[in-house]
């Protein structure tokens, strides 16, 4: 207990300094960002064991120093086409908790990791209404950054939403099973 | 019950919190806040209000908004205490008087029972305390106790209980006078009840005296001279303890552990630590007087013990700790000087507390008179007086100080008291010596006990178990390394196998650290049964068996919920109302049996009731309504197991009305989910009109299993060895295809369906030809089937890990394990696999 508390206090203290820091990464040509406080570490691609009966974007589970964590493919998560892994492909280990849920640690496969950027609140705009590919609940906001004298927009992700493997979907599946059995 | 736990937590936190320690205060505030919301949701307004106030107050202390921190903190403590009693009141409605009819029947049976016990007791006295008679008496007393409990005769129940304890304690001498005294008392009780069923239970003071733990010397005297009547012979004008002389020398302090919970053990451990600290501090004060901090250390020790003991309802410990604390407080605030006498008293208090705490874990009982004298001396010391002696029968024998004088380094401690006269050869002097002997005996006993248990945080224990798990993996990595495998050096191989043995032993030992008994879980259930029965207006008797069975701590934690649901269901739906029971010719009170036992490599926990049983018709009717059963099926032929399995479906309830206890159809779903998460299974047996049995089969431990590593394509899976009956390579002659789809294999004892693991796990790799792979005959409960894999790679123990915190529930997979090469292999959940294989969605795939 005590250790956890201390960690929390540490996190609280460091939050102030890192609040506006985002780790940016690429999926294809698009730039995404996640709050740096949610990132535990970045590791190279490891052996992943596939999990049956899970959505395609769940690539499986891997061994993170003795702990088994699920790994999702962010490309598939956002409905982008899948690609071959390259030297730059890596796994960002993210940590977040769903509402009232337990802390979840999960790996997310991204094409490449770019940098840690400071994006002040003033430079973040709410997501526009696309009515499109990426459901809005995944998006925290649109961050505007300057990169080599060029303006660029980074899509800031709501990690808790992104890494939540919807259990609701599974329950719906189970109900369907029951119905099918009845039919 | 959850509320009670939060109050417990808050109270514990409060006791351990110092008013100056802001961090702890914040934690305490949070706990109180939580408590307040919990209480509000349970509708106990008093607790909610008081705890909210306390939370505010503790926050204000943190914010430095109060002038007198100590006073504010005391208020917080008070509020918690009020919450506790309010919660007690809310959750424990006063016991209703027992059914008069039942009571009269019992009275009648007692009229013959008591003389029988008396007769047996007298026989035992003449023939000696031989096994059979003694056991008979004990049985009868025990029955009596149970009956009194059912009839809400609390006094009688505790009396019988104490008598039992006494009989157990004095195995070699039969406490006949105690038995007879209790019998007499019971007779007067029965007489009173016979005239008036609502009569109060008679006073127990006299009979209690004879129940006090008799020491060998007393046996001879008490028969001729009943306890409690010893005349004070001392000159009462000069003796401050004259009134105490009425307490027989050998009367022991009794500590009622009836209401004690599992915290008592922790308290005993902690309290011993505190006492040790206090004693060390006293010694350092003696060596180096004038260090105010050391006084504080001693003060805090007694204060903490007092607080926790008060909270745990141990009044005798509070009594001593409070007196000592009070004295130390005076010293701390310089109201009285810190003399050698004070230090001596502090040490005496520490000894007394040590002995009282020792009683919690079965140590020798402290002497009532010693305790009273000590408290008297402490109180006198607070007023600056020195009471050092006890004057009985003209002799001076400072009982309380004999123990300490030897231990105190300063002779002043003894000097301030009057000189002990060495020529006291009175019975008191002798018994004091005996007391000292038994004291020192119990002390070594207590230390031995304390050494046997060490309090370790669960975090550390878990990390140890995890590390050992890693060690097992690492060791396997070494042994399975091809280079090592090719070493044909005998010494290396011998050393490796030695290493393997040590690792296995280490693993077993570390696993055993996590084993706890089911006692506390079952105790909670007893309370639940009582509450639910009261709510439903039924009389239900709970019989518990096997509460000493040990299980992995994690498993024990997880089975609480399913048990609660099963027991609620049994009480609410299973056991019928009294009139219905009578009509069915059953006894008025329902019986619920909670049993735990070992069976094979697992633990079986059963909840059995003698109620109406599950109604097959009602379940089938409901299934038809919901469209779960094909109406064209012959309803009489549906196997029992299938019918009963439907009640585990979410939202399935045959209850005609939803009560506030159960009936929403959520419970059994929770039961199955939780138990399956533990790799266990539930089975139901039920006979209409006779009752039902729900049995949960659970693994002993959740952390490690023996597994067979199998390969399908490039993937490896682990199948628990326990579920594998055998494996074989099928020949073409054994195989049959049904309708071009379902495959079956003929084995010695019949046909078994074949399920291909690659299909069930949607793999597009692996052998397709059955003759080129292996079939594993798997069994889970009554279900058997063959599962097709490419090959078996080997057998090994694996550490089960969950697949991430969000625990994606995957049918047929119970978890993951890290193999020797660092990759993750999924562990096959045979029960889930076989079940999902039989659902149309998968078998058609």
Image (cartoon, coloured by chain):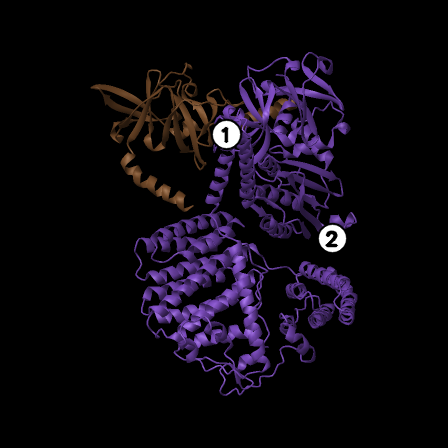
Chain colours: A brown, B purple
Q: Residues within 10 Å of mark 2 (few under 14, many from 20)?
A: some
Which secondary structure, mark 1?
helix
Question: Looking at the image, which residue is at 56% across and 72% down?
Answer: B435
Left or right position of A78 against B526: left
B646 versus B276 height, above or below: above
How far across and down, in percent of the image, does residue B773 sit? 63, 17
Left or right position of B552 against B570: left
Left or right position of B715 against B412: right
B496 versus B190 height, above or below: above
User: Total of numbered circles in the picture?
Assistant: 2
Q: CA distance from mark 2 to mark 1?
A: 65 Å
Chain letter for the residue marked with disc 1 in the picture:
B
How far across and down, in percent of the image, does residue B465 sit? 50, 40
A46 versus B601 height, above or below: above
Q: Which mark is residue B328?
A: none
**Camera-nearest residue between B247 and B657:** B247
Give whichever of discs 2 and 1 has the lower sequence position. 1
Residue at mark 2: B588
How far across and down, in percent of the image, does residue A35 sit? 33, 30
**Camera-nearest residue between B296 and B99:** B296
Residue at mark 1: B478
Quarter of the picture containing the C terminus of chain B is: top right
Chain letter for the residue marked with disc 2 in the picture:
B
Which secondary structure, mark 2?
loop
Residue A120's quadrant in the figure? top left
Foreground tag (2 vs 1)? 1
């Amino acid at each position: 207990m005590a250790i956890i508390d201390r960690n929390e206090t540490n996190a609280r203290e460091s939050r102030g300094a890192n609040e506006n820091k985002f780790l940016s990464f690429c999926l294809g040509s698009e730039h995404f960002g996640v709050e740096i406080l949610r990132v535990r570490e970045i590791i190279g691609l490891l052996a992943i064991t596939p999990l049956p009966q899970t959505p395609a974007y769940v690539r499986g589970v891997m061994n993170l120093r003795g702990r088994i964590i699920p790994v999702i493919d962010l490309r598939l998560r956002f409905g982008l086409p899948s690609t071959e892994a390259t030297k730059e492909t890596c796994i960002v280990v993210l940590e977040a908790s769903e509402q009232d849920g337990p802390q979840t640690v999960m790996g997310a496969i991204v094409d490449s990791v770019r940098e840690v950027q400071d994006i002040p609140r003033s430079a973040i705009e709410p997501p526009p209404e696309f009515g499109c590919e990426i459901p809005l609940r995944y998006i925290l906001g649109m961050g505007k950054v300057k990169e080599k004298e060029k303006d660029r927009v980074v899509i800031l992700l709501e990690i808790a939403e992104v890494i939540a493997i919807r259990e609701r979907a599974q329950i719906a599946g189970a109900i369907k099973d029951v119905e099918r059995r009845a039919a | 019950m959850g509320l009670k736990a939060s109050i417990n937590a808050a109270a514990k936190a409060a006791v351990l919190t110092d008013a100056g320690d802001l961090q702890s205060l914040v934690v305490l505030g949070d706990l109180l806040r939580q408590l307040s919301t919990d209480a509000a949701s349970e509708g106990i307004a008093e607790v909610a209000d008081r705890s909210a106030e306390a939370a505010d107050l503790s926050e204000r202390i943190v914010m430095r908004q109060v002038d007198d921190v100590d006073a504010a903190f005391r208020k917080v403590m008070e509020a918690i205490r009020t919450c506790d009693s309010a919660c007690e009141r809310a959750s424990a409605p006063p016991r209703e008087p027992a059914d008069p009819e039942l009571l009269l029947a019992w009275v009648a049976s007692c009229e013959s029972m008591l003389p029988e016990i008396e007769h047996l007791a007298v026989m035992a006295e003449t023939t000696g305390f031989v096994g059979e008679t003694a056991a008979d008496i004990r049985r009868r007393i025990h029955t009596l106790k149970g009956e009194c409990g059912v009839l809400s005769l609390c006094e009688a129940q505790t009396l019988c209980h104490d008598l039992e304890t006494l009989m157990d304690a004095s195995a070699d001498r039969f406490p006949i006078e105690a038995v007879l005294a209790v019998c007499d008392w019971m007779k007067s009780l029965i007489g009173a009840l016979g005239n008036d069923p609502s009569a109060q239970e008679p006073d127990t003071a006299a009979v209690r005296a004879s129940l006090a733990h008799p020491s060998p010397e007393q046996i001879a005297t008490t028969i001729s001279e009943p306890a409690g009547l010893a005349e004070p012979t001392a000159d009462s004008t000069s003796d401050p303890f004259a009134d105490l002389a009425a307490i027989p020398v050998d009367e022991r302090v009794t500590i009622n552990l009836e209401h004690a919970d599992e915290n008592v053990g922790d308290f005993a451990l902690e309290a011993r630590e505190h006492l040790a600290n206090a004693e060390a501090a006293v010694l350092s004060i003696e060596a180096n007087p004038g260090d105010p901090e050391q006084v504080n250390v001693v003060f805090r020790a007694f204060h903490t013990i007092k607080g926790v003991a008060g909270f745990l309802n141990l009044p005798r410990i509070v009594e001593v700790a409070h007196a000592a604390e009070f004295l130390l407080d005076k010293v701390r605030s310089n109201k009285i000087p810190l003399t050698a006498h004070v230090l001596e008293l502090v040490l005496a208090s520490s000894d007394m507390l040590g002995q009282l705490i020792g009683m919690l874990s079965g140590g020798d009982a402290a002497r009532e008179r010693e305790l009273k004298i000590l408290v008297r001396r402490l109180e006198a010391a607070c007023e600056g007086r020195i009471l050092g002696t006890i004057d009985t029968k003209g002799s001076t024998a400072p009982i309380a100080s004999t123990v300490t004088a030897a231990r105190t380094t300063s002779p002043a401690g003894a000097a301030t008291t009057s000189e002990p006269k060495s020529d006291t050869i009175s019975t008191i002097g002798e018994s004091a010596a005996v007391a000292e002997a038994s004291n020192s005996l119990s002390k070594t006993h207590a230390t031995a006990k304390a050494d046997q248990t060490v309090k370790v945080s669960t975090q550390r224990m878990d990390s140890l178990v995890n590390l050992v798990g890693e060690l097992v993996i690492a060791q396997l990595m070494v042994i399975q390394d091809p280079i090592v495998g090719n070493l044909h050096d005998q010494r290396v191989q011998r050393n490796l196998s030695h290493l393997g043995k040590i690792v296995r032993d280490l693993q077993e030992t570390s696993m055993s650290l996590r084993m706890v008994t089911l006692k506390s879980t079952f105790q909670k259930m007893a309370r639940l049964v009582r509450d639910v029965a009261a709510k439903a207006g039924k009389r239900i008797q709970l019989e518990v068996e096997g509460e000493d069975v040990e299980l992995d701590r994690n498993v024990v934690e997880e089975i609480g919920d399913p048990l609660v649901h099963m027991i609620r269901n049994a009480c609410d739906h299973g056991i019928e109302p009294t009139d219905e029971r009578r009509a069915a010719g059953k006894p008025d009170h329902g019986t619920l049996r909670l049993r735990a036992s070992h069976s094979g490599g697992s633990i079986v926990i059963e909840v059995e009731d003698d109620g109406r049983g599950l109604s097959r018709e009602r379940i089938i009717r409901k299934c038809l309504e919901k469209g779960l059963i094909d109406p064209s099926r012959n309803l009489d032929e549906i196997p029992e197991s299938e019918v009963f399995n439907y009640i585990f479906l979410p939202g399935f309830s045959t209850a005609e009305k939803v009560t506030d206890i159960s009936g929403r159809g959520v419970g059994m779903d929770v039961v199955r989910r939780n138990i399956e998460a533990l790799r266990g299974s539930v089975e139901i047996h039920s006979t209409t009109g006779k009752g039902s049995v729900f049995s949960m089969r659970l693994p002993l431990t959740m952390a490690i299993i023996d597994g067979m590593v199998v390969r399908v394509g490039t993937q490896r899976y682990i199948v628990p060895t326990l579920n594998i009956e055998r494996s074989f390579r099928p020949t073409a002659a054994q195989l049959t295809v049904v309708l071009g789809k379902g495959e079956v294999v003929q084995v010695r004892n019949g046909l078994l369906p074949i399920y291909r693991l690659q299909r069930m796990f949607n793999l597009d790799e692996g052998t397709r030809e059955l003759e080129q792979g292996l079939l594993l005959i798997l069994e889970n409960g009554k279900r058997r089937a063959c599962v097709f894999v490419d090959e078996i790679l080997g057998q090994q123990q694996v550490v089960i890990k969950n697949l991430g915190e969000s625990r994606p529930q995957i049918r047929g997979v119970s978890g993951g394990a890290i193999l020797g090469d660092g990759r993750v292999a999924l562990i096959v959940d045979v029960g889930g696999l076989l079940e999902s294989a039989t659902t149309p969605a998968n078998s058609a795939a």
